[in-house]
Amino acid sequence: MSPARGNKYMTASPATRVLGVVAVAAALLMALLGLIVSPADVVQGQAVRMLYLHVPSIWIAYGAFVLTAVSSALFLIRSRRREDSGRHHDRLAGAAAEVGVVFAGITLVTGMLWGRVTWGTYWQWDARLTTTVLLFVTYLGYLALRRLPADPMIRGRRSAVMALISIINVPIVHFSVDWWRTLHQKASLSVGRRPEITGEMYWTLLYSTLAVTIVASWLIVHRYRVIRLEELRDEEALNALIASRLREDE
Amino acid sequence: MLHEVLLIARKDLRVEWRSKVTLGQVAPMGLLVLVVFAFAFDANTRLLELGAGGLFWVAVLFGGTLLIQRAFEVETDDGNFDAFRMSTIRAPSLFLGKSLGIFIQVVLLELVLGPGIVLLYNVRIDDWLLLLAAALGGTLAFSVCGVLWGVMAAGTRVRATLLPLLLVPILAPVLLAGSRAFETAFGVRAEAGWTWASLMFVIAAVHAAVGMGTFGFLLEES
């Protein structure tokens, strides 16, 4: 996931530039399909258009958090074997969590707006809303832990353990809150179940999921490279400091 | 292993006994929280009675978070984790020992808060067995989660603010289950109180297993 040779301080490479153009085009087409081509829903009216962003966003958020957990596990395994190894897994975990938090935030905002129009209120203590907000805050905590000033390996191990515990906790939170109360409509798209929406709406939602996935992938690649550059900056600053102290001693 | 666990717990409790922070500061603060809740609900006795279960666990969360912070401050301020790393005590034993220490301190806090809600909120207890089981499960879950996240925030300059941010979302199912189980025990809600109580034991077991497996990683860096 490194940028092209000779571009040590850049986050773009020819491949990611292409990916970026594809992501922007995909997002524009998604806006066209969602806002113009797709019809209004009989029951939900124009509010249904919010779902074209809301549903893919939560899929991406869950996917990003799973990627964070998998990368964290790989980081722990690699760094256990050899010190200073597997840092790219740690960077990928951090990048995925950042993007996951952004999309979880988008899910919450679009969900609240949709709720205001459909349910008549911004917030209901419904199982999925509550689970999502807890998930959002959990990963905000994860990002706060990653921001603490510390040796990258130390910080990486702490964050990795937190990522693993957080993902284990997701079903527990979901189960407990689901049991508490459920008001949310059933999933619009689900593997192995007949979808609740059909026709242009179904295809728009399916396409939106693909478009949002491309955008999220693009963001993760760039965030990964920004994290790498931040580490590089810190290392170079430290080396410069050591060199200046050595010169003073001479 | 049991010997090591008891050794660590005894050390923590001895430190606590000498400083008297749990009984002298945290427990009165917990009682104060119960009084403040009455201000928030405009001393509406019916509302307080209905919400007593949840308010009890929120007060435990406030007080317990302070206890966890303190349990790790005494270690990191004097660099005790370095001593632990050099000692022969294994990481899982240290995790369980610290959890046991916190568990006993939180039980003491609950022994003050329990009569507090009975007297202040006019609560009547219908099912003592469920109440005790829920208190045991919730306290176990709180202790193991607290130690797991406490060590993560330990040694950082922002630990006072970081610990609640990390701890509260993880403890949300415990707060929820504890509240519902207590409400059933108080007879204000006809629900599956025993199932909620069981959920807390499951959460405690899951986090205890994760804590025993990962505490070594976290201890290396504290």
Image (spheres, coloured by chain):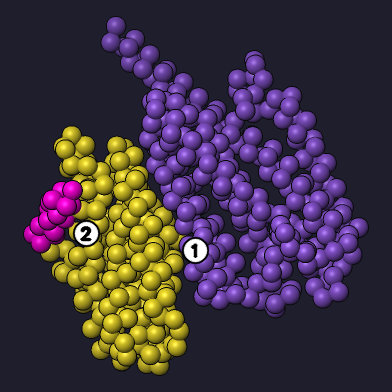
Do the residues bearing badges 1 and 2 touch, measured as CB atoms within 8 Å? no
Indicate the secondary structure of the residue bearing disc 2. helix
Residue at (69% x, 71% y) in the render: A185
Question: Element at badge 1?
Answer: helix
Q: Colour of chain A?
A: purple
Quarter of the picture containing the N terminus of chain A is: top right
Which secondary structure is most common in the magenta stretch?
Answer: helix
Tell me if I can see residue B209 in this picture. Answer: yes
Q: Which residue is mark 1?
A: A173
Q: Nearer the viewer, residue B87 or A101?
A: B87
Q: Amino acid at mark 2?
A: Leu
The residue under label 2 is B100
- Quarter-wise, where is residue B46 in the image? bottom left
Which residue: 41% across, 74% down? B196
Q: Is residue B12 magenta?
A: yes
The location of residue A75, given as percent across then percent down, is 46, 34
Q: What quarter of the picture does the C terminus of chain A occupy? A: top left
**Image coordinates for residue B134, horizontal then vertical, percent:** 33, 75
Q: Chain of mark 1?
A: A
Report x, y in % for residue A161.
Answer: 41, 44
The span from disc 1 to disc 2 (Cα, nearest Å) is 25 Å
Q: Is residue B152 left or right of residue A47?
A: left
Please state the extent of the stretch shown in magenta in the rendering.
Answer: B1-19
Q: Which mark is residue A26?
A: none
Circle 1: residue type: Val
Chain corresponding to yellow in the figure: B
In front here: A194 or A111?
A194
Residue B175 seen from this side: no
Mark 1 packing: few (<14 Cα in 10 Å), some, or many (20+)?
Answer: many
Q: Tell me the chain of label 2.
A: B
Q: Residue at x 26, y 50 (%)?
A: B95
Q: Is residue A124 left or right of residue A44?
A: left
